């Protein structure tokens, strides 16, 4: 059974393309079922985050074109635009890649912990609809165990730098004192909570959370001692805020250039800092063209983040070494399980042959055949049955000149005389 990972990320595709092919949490089950139906792939997990969309499946290189075509069709994306951004990994390369992703080594922010939880969620969704099996089930458990080990044995997960934390440093270049700033978080999901913590640590004057359903934001608001407002009131209240972080699952931008023009007018040209953490984007890119508006997306932060994360190179090297060993361990575990299955099948096959010949021998005895004759027939019949398939395979190997196979059979049956003694379990 072959492992295949296919997808695109912040390293291969711009945000405009990533948001086109992103799947919301509510879309994943239908998408997995649709892909399995269209391609007949047995096991499928779809990982979709702000920075990547990956299809993890039991497929092979021949399936790549079909999967890309399905992705383009399902996401209503131009195939010619999508194909250059797609990467793929197979077999052990895929295992190493997935562990790197889970650890955070392949993230825009090296070592960020959110991707670990996102991979868990992606696996649980696929597992809940029966889309995982004998390959992906043990694979993901191995990935999760390996991730915990890497994060505990290296510094890759310590002193984590996030996009919101990096944005704080940029905001300090605009506002002399963040303690006088009023901040707004739009959304109430995991990314919103991550974005809120650096604001609290910066001791902003006040923090407000806006969400389509205020009840969903109250639990998060209680953690931050924040105010809650419904999303419907945003157009009338947006001018109150100096720092605006948005991370919703909306399919279309809801903060447009016209709205922000009115906001700037109300603020009397006082600057406003906007961090768009959403994919697809919550804020129209044209908003960044307005004077006194400082708009940043995840892609805009990439260079700044890269500078801040150089100190993690040593930890990343240590993590890479652990990942290499973890990938090898998975290969060895798979081989061991395969060997056990083969050994079980061999024993079952030989037991069946023995039972067939034993039944014939008993029938011969019942008919009055002399015992010596019965034993000779039993021995000859058992030998013929056991030797039949290997004999045919050896003849074919001889025709092909496959000396390795012939040597393997010789070793397997101890034909070199190295093991002439009786064999016991």
Image (cartoon, rainbow, N blue to C red):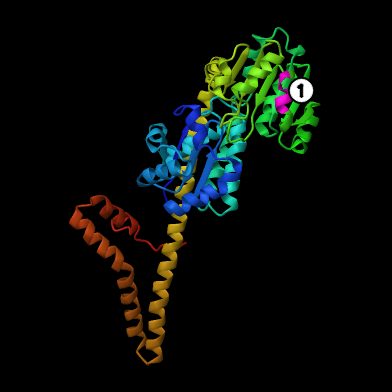
Q: Position of residue 167 (x, y in %)?
A: 63, 18
- Depth order, front residue of 376/88: 88
Disc 1 residue crowd, few under 14, some 14–19, many 20+, Cα 10 Å: many
Q: Is residue 253 visible?
A: yes
SS for dot 1? strand
Give the percent coordinates (x, y) of residue 13: 45, 29
**Residue 209 position by quadrant:** top right
Q: Quadrant of residue 104?
A: top right
Q: Nearer the viewer, residue 41 or 375?
A: 41
Q: Give yes or no for residue 341 being in the magenta stretch.
A: no
In the rendered image, the residue lying farthest to the bottom is 368
**Image coordinates for residue 337, horizontal then vertical, percent:** 48, 52
Please state the horizontal and vertical placement of residue 23, each as a whole percent of the image: 55, 40
Q: Which residue is mark 1?
A: 207
Q: Does 285 sit left or right of 66 as displayed?
A: right
Above or below for 342 versus 9:
below
Q: Which residues are magenta?
A: 234-239
**Residue drawn at x 52%, y 16% as measured from the top left:** 303
Q: Is residue 236 left or right of residue 46?
A: right
Name above or below for residue 238 compared with residue 76.
above
Helix, strand or loop for the magenta stretch, by majority: helix
> Taking 123 as reference, is 85 left or right?
left
Identity of the residue drawn at 52% across and 49% down:
32
């Amino acid at each position: 059974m072959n492992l295949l990972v296919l997808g695109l990320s912040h390293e291969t595709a711009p945000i405009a393309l990533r948001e086109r092919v992103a799947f919301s949490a509510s879309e994943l089950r239908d998408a997995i079922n649709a892909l399995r139906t269209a391609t007949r792939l047995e096991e499928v997990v779809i990982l979709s985050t702000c920075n990547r969309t990956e299809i993890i499946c039991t497929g092979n290189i021949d399936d790549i074109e079909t999967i890309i075509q399905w992705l383009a069709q399902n996401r209503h994306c131009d195939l010619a635009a999508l194909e250059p951004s797609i990467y793929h990994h197979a077999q052990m390369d895929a295992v190493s890649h997935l562990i790197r992703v889970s650890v955070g080594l392949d993230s825009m922010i090296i070592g960020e912990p959110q991707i670990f939880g996102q991979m868990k969620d992606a696996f649980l969704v696929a597992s809940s609809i029966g889309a995982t099996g004998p390959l992906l089930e043990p694979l993901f458990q191995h990935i999760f165990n390996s991730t915990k080990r890497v994060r505990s044995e290296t510094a890759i997960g310590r002193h984590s730098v996030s996009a919101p934390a990096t944005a704080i440093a940029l905001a300090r270049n605009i506002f002399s004192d963040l303690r006088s700033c009023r901040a707004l978080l739009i959304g109430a999901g995991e990314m919103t909570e991550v974005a809120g913590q650096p604001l609290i640590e910066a001791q902003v004057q006040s923090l407000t959370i806006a969400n389509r359903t205020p009840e969903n934001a109250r639990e998060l608001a209680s953690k931050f001692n924040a105010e809650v407002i419904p999303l419907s009131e945003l157009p009338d209240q947006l001018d109150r805020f100096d720092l605006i972080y948005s991370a919703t699952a909306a399919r279309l931008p809801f903060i447009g250039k016209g709205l922000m023009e009115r906001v700037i007018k109300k603020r009397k040209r006082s600057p406003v800092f906007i961090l768009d953490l959403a994919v697809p984007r919550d804020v129209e890119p044209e908003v960044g063209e307005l004077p006194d508006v400082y708009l940043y997306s995840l892609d805009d932060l990439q260079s700044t983040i890269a500078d801040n994360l150089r100190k993690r190179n040593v930890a990343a090297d240590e993590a890479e070494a652990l990942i290499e060993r973890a990938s090898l361990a998975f290969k060895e575990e798979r081989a061991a399980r395969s060997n056990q299955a083969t050994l079980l099948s061999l024993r079952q096959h030989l037991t069946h042959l023995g039972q067939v010949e034993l039944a014939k021998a008993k029938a011969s005895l019942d008919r009055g055949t002399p015992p010596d004759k019965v034993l000779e027939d039993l021995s000859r019949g058992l030998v013929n049955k056991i030797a039949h398939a290997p004999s045919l395979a050896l003849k074919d190997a001889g025709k092909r000149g496959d000396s390795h196979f012939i040597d393997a059979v010789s070793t397997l049956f101890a034909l070199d005389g190295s093991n002439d003694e009786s064999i016991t379990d």
